[in-house]
Amino acid sequence: MSIDTKAVLAGERLALARLLTQIENQTEDGQRALGELFPHTGNAHLIGVTGAPGTGKSSLVNQLAYHFRNPAAGEPQRVAIVAVDPSSPFTGGAVLGDRIRMTALIGDEGVFIRSMASRGSLGGLAQNTAGVVQAYDAAGYEVIIIETVGAGQSEVDIARLAHTTLVVEAPGLGDDIQAIKAGILEIADILVINKADRPGVENTERALKNMLALAHPVQRVFRHHGQRMEAQAVTDESAPMWVPPIQRTVATDGTGLPEMMEHIAAHREFLQTSGDLERRERARLANELDLRLRATLTENFQAGLKNGAYDEALEAIVKRKLSPQEAVQKLLQSK
Ligand SMILES: Nc1nc2c(ncn2[C@@H]2O[C@H](COP(=O)(O)OP(=O)(O)OP(=O)(O)O)[C@@H](O)[C@H]2O)c(=O)[nH]1
Ligand SMILES: [Mg+2]
């Protein structure tokens, strides 16, 4: 079934839901629709929420959505959420403690939630997520929240997709030093200690503060999106810096959420005034271009190979008759 992109642009939920399915299934219709919609994207504030399983990311995302819908000041904003591979179900409130706020989101036309299963390759998931975010953006959602379970690479990928990245920690997850291993300082714009009602919160905060003190903020901010940004950072030492705040929250009752909203607003302001928003957008789109280019080149190349040529080459490598380098040359020449 072809996709009604006009209806998507008009914000019709059913059309959007259909498009998301096409994106997830990587259909040609879906890709074509995304192409048509692309000129209408680039307006939303993309917020990434990542952290270890069970730290309360979904609960926190629900709270954020509630606060964007019911702001302390200003107009309510429309919020779309994509939860990538959640290990616990994301049902728009069912996993949550704060029933009153969560119930307020159910049936709210200004909120759209989609969970995505991680199937296929990691690259495929990253592409699909980027597609879903574009669809939301075109549909006019002002805030797009992307939740992923952080496990190294996916944390980095989400940071590339988001303007503002929240890294969620929780006390008592075992090793407080877990934070360093995952390299979270590289990608966190805001550090959240959720489950602040639990014992051990001081230890977690102390560990995070120590880590932050050891980091080099100037480099940290600009290395955010890889090599290309680094050169800029070195030459531009007068550029304003963002030091990631640490915020305690209790996502099950909303404690710390007003402060959290202030940090997000401040970061957004920083992105705009420092010029970092433009740099991040550029890096983000470069990343997507690279990702798609690589995927397409590989696909085209493999489609043009003679039957069995790849397996033969692999077999020769396994038997040490060819080096991987030689095998690549051979495959390239066999075309
Ligand atoms: N005590 C306490 N429990 C919380 C808090 N936030 C979330 N929880 C509970 O922790 C459990 C996991 O919460 P989720 O929001 O599903 O966590 P998640 O990080 O999204 O989990 P995954 O997506 O499966 O990685 C649920 O039972 C929540 O009710 C909190 O601040 N304090
Ligand atoms: Mg979750």
Image (tube, helix red, strand yellow):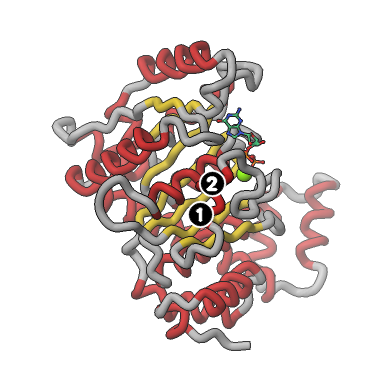
Which quadrant of the render holds ligand 2? top right
Q: Residues within 10 Å of mark 1 (few under 14, many from 20)?
A: few
Image disc number at residue 265:
none
Q: Residue 327 sits in which quadrant?
A: bottom right
Q: How far from the left and from the top, in percent, is residue 108? A: 49, 63
Which of the pair 288/33 is nearer the observer?
33
Q: Residue 298 sits in which quadrant?
A: bottom right
Q: Residues within 10 Å of mark 2 (few under 14, many from 20)?
A: few
SS of the residue under disc 1: helix
Q: How far from the left and from the top, in percent, is residue 187? A: 43, 36
Q: How far from the left and from the top, in percent, is residue 334? A: 69, 70
Find out whether the residues at labels 2 and 1 contact each other: C-beta distance under 8 Å: yes
Which of the pair 101/162 is nearer the observer?
101
Toward the front, the furthest residue is 100
Report the amino acid beneath label 2: Ile
Residue drawn at the location 68% of the way across and 64% of the way down: 331
Which of the pair 109/294 is nearer the observer?
109
SS of the residue under disc 2: helix
Left or right placement of residue 239 versus residue 303 in this view = left
Left or right placement of residue 93 versus residue 281 in this view = right
Residue drawn at the location 51% of the way across and 30% of the way down: 250
Q: Residue 197 sits in which quadrant?
A: top right
Report the amino acid beneath label 1: Ala
Report which residue position mark 1 lands on: 104
Distance of label 2 from label 1 (alpha carbons): 6 Å
